[in-house]
């Protein structure tokens, strides 16, 4: 059974009549916003991204379900990177990652819809996760976000891995000796650039690496902070108290 636009609009109007309080007001506001007259929508279209803005920024304060869904999916990436020990992460590491970093994996032709969508969130999630190096044993040298310039594999080509004479799966610990950064000798211009712009702190072989979620002050993953990071900044509107 299909419902035409007139029928769906009528249902929305009836729903607004039966709902009480803020819920009914919200439905009526949406009908006004869409300029519903005699069961027909007229006027300019309004983007959901604008409607989902807070009221003090010109929106209606409706939860942005697209950003919310992305934030929940990014949590799975955080669990994989942070080393959460549960059935799902164990299964993913065994059957999908197979010893590789989550950041070097691309979606194969034959894979589940969920896994493909998760991998597409790489560009969003990667800058939000920072590795603070201790002994470097838990951080990928080439793929994790620990270097001041960001993940090495994103800024420099894979040639630098060959020039360094290190494995693709090498950890940062391979260039940590005590409290010093020690790179292999090489005349590679890219490698020299990497060496010259290392973290301002020294590593420490007696400490474990620390993984931080940058959007939160305490470095722990939070859905709310992730959603806030996904939103485009908007200025406060002077008339929001009148709505």
Image (cartoon, rainbow, N blue to C red):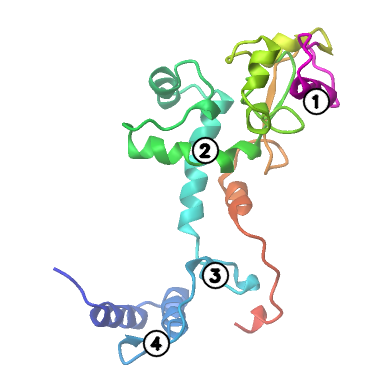
Q: CA distance from mark 1 to mark 3?
A: 43 Å
Q: CA distance from mark 4 to mark 3?
A: 18 Å
Task: Tell me where residue 2 appears, x and y as whole percent.
Answer: 17, 70
Q: Nearer the viewer, residue 117 or 213?
A: 117
Q: Nearer the viewer, residue 191 or 65?
A: 191
Looking at the rendered structure, the secondary structure element under dot 3 is helix
Instruction: Say whether disc 1 or disc 3 marks the residue closer to the N-terminus.
Output: 3
Q: Residue furthest bottom?
A: 38
* Residue in the image at 67% along x and 44% along y: 215
Which quadrant of the figure contains the C terminus? bottom right
Instruction: Say whether disc 1 or disc 4 marks the residue closer to the N-terminus.
Output: 4
Looking at the rendered structure, the secondary structure element under dot 1 is helix
Task: Tell me where residue 77 appears, x and y as whole percent.
Answer: 52, 33
Q: Which residue is the site of mark 3? A: 50
Q: CA distance from mark 3 to mark 2?
A: 25 Å
Q: Residues within 10 Å of mark 3 (few under 14, many from 20)?
A: some
Q: CA distance from mark 4 to mark 2?
A: 40 Å
Q: Which residue is the site of mark 1? A: 193
Is 123 on the left or on the right of 197, as rendered? left
Magenta highlight on residue 196: yes
* Residue in the image at 70% along x and 9% along y: 174
Residue bounds of the magenta highlight: 182-205
Q: Residues within 10 Å of mark 2 (few under 14, many from 20)?
A: some
């Amino acid at each position: 059974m299909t419902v035409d636009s007139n029928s769906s609009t009528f249902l929305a109007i009836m729903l607004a009549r039966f709902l009480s309080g803020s819920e009914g007001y919200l439905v009526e506001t949406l009908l006004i916003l869409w300029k519903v007259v005699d069961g027909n929508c007229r006027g300019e279209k309004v983007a959901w991204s604008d409607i989902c803005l807070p009221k003090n920024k010109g929106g209606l304060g409706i939860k942005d379900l697209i950003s919310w869904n992305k934030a929940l999916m990014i949590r799975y990436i955080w669990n994989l990177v942070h080393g959460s020990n549960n059935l799902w992460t164990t299964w993913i590491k065994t059957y999908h990652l197979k010893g590789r970093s989550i950041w070097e994996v691309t979606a194969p032709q034959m894979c589940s819809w969920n896994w493909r969508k998760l991998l597409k969130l790489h560009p969003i999630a990667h800058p939000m996760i920072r590795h603070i190096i201790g002994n470097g044993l838990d951080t990928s040298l080439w793929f994790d976000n620990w270097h001041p310039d960001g993940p090495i594999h994103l800024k420099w080509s894979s040639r630098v891995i060959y020039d360094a004479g290190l494995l693709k799966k090498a950890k940062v610990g391979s260039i940590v000796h005590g409290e010093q950064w020690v790179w292999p000798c090489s005349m590679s211009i890219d490698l020299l650039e990497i060496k010259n712009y290392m973290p301002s702190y020294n590593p420490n072989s007696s400490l474990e690496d620390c993984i931080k979620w940058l959007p939160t002050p305490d470095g722990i993953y939070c859905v709310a902070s992730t959603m806030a990071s996904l939103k485009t900044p908007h200025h406060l509107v002077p008339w929001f108290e009148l709505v």
